[in-house]
Image (cartoon, rainbow, N blue to C red):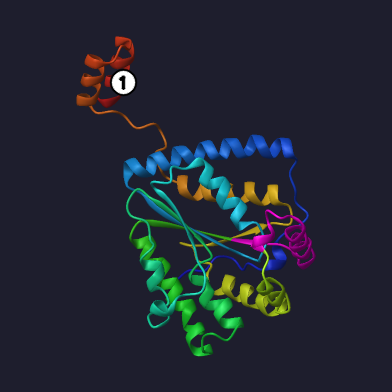
Amino acid sequence: MLKTPSLRLSDADLTKKVSKDKYQLKLFDLQQQLARIQQAYLFHGHKAVIVFEGWDAAGKGGTIRRISQALDPRSFKVWPIGAPRDYYQARHHLLRFWERLPPEGAISAFDRSWYGRVLVERIEGFTAEKRWRQGYREINEFERMLVDNDTRVIKLFFHISADEQMRRFEERLRNPMKRWKLTYEDFRNRTKWEAYSEAIDEMFEKTSTRIAPWHLIPANHKRYARLTAIRKVVAALSDGVDLDPQHLDRRTLDAASEHLNVEQELIDSLRARTE
């Protein structure tokens, strides 16, 4: 499987930022594009998976919320992924993800994903080294099967500095509405920052492929990270897709002409598009 050019955490320029006014304008435009993409996917039967990975407090949830604001929840599903329960621990690690893949016309977002096999399970020793090393090949083959089944795969990794992460932890502690996000595990994981960094770089090396490349999102500044991530999603989802508003069939237009008080000129123009 062809790999993409080498990618490392150190490639991210964490100084990048965007003004609030520019952010609001760009976000609105991107959300409008997402809405058009969803309509096209529903009409044409396309499907896609968006993978969100990154450091604790790196902004994955905030980006997912901005995407969700633009999309109809009937064909957009967010799957928050935590530790597998006993049923899945006794089975292949990809099973629970197979069960959550989108049907035709839908888009699924995974807030953390099958990459836990080569990140958390590797660092925390939950899986034997032989098994997590096999995970690279299994993941590549899994994503190849998705793409072969006409499912687009978009993978985003949100990178922040250790200092910025600590600042966000403090913000969560001080803000009663965000305090629920802060856990003991957040602090414990920081003691393994270097080990996780090494595992992330190896993950990029082994699993960033031509058909399912990783996109590294500099996330020290939340507004910049959200816009960058959503741009990547829009570009990947819209590539080669007809985003023009879909045409009504002649029977629907005939019924509209009979029952609705609209100009005949509008009906005629819509009929012309179906011919």
Q: Is residue 144 shown left or right of residue 209? A: left
Q: Position of residue 25 (x, y in %)?
A: 65, 34
Image quarter (top left, top right, bottom left or bottom right) of the C terminus: top left
Identified by mark 1, the residue type is Leu
Instruction: Between residue 1 and residue 128, name the one nearer to us.
Output: 128
Tell me where residue 21 sits by quadrant: top right
Instruction: Between residue 228 and residue 119, name the one nearer to us.
Output: 119
Name the residue rendered at 32%, 17% in the picture: 269
Q: Is residue 74 above or below residue 147?
A: above
Q: Is residue 36 above or below residue 151?
A: above
Is residue 266 magenta-colored? no
Residue 138 visible from this viewpoint:
yes
Q: Is residue 121 shown left or right of residue 168? A: left
Q: Is residue 160 shown left or right of residue 27? A: right
Name the residue rendered at 28%, 28% in the picture: 248
Name the residue rendered at 49%, 89% in the picture: 130
Is residue 172 magenta-colored? yes
Image quarter (top left, top right, bottom left or bottom right) of the N terminus: bottom left
Q: Main secondary structure of the magenta part?
A: helix
Q: Secondary structure at mark 1?
A: helix
Tell me where residue 141 sits by quadrant: bottom left
Instruction: Between residue 69 and residue 154, name the one nearer to us.
Output: 69
> Which residue is farthest front?
176
Q: Pointer 1: what residue?
A: 270
Name the residue rendered at 63%, 67% in the picture: 7
Q: Position of residue 265 (x, y in %)?
A: 32, 10
Instruction: Between residue 260 and residue 40, name the one nearer to us.
Output: 260
Q: Position of residue 134 (x, y in %)?
A: 47, 83
Q: Residues within 10 Å of mark 1 (few under 14, many from 20)?
A: some
Residue 13 visible from this viewpoint:
no
Q: Position of residue 61 (x, y in %)?
A: 59, 55
- In the rendered structure, which segment of residues is drawn in magenta? 157-181
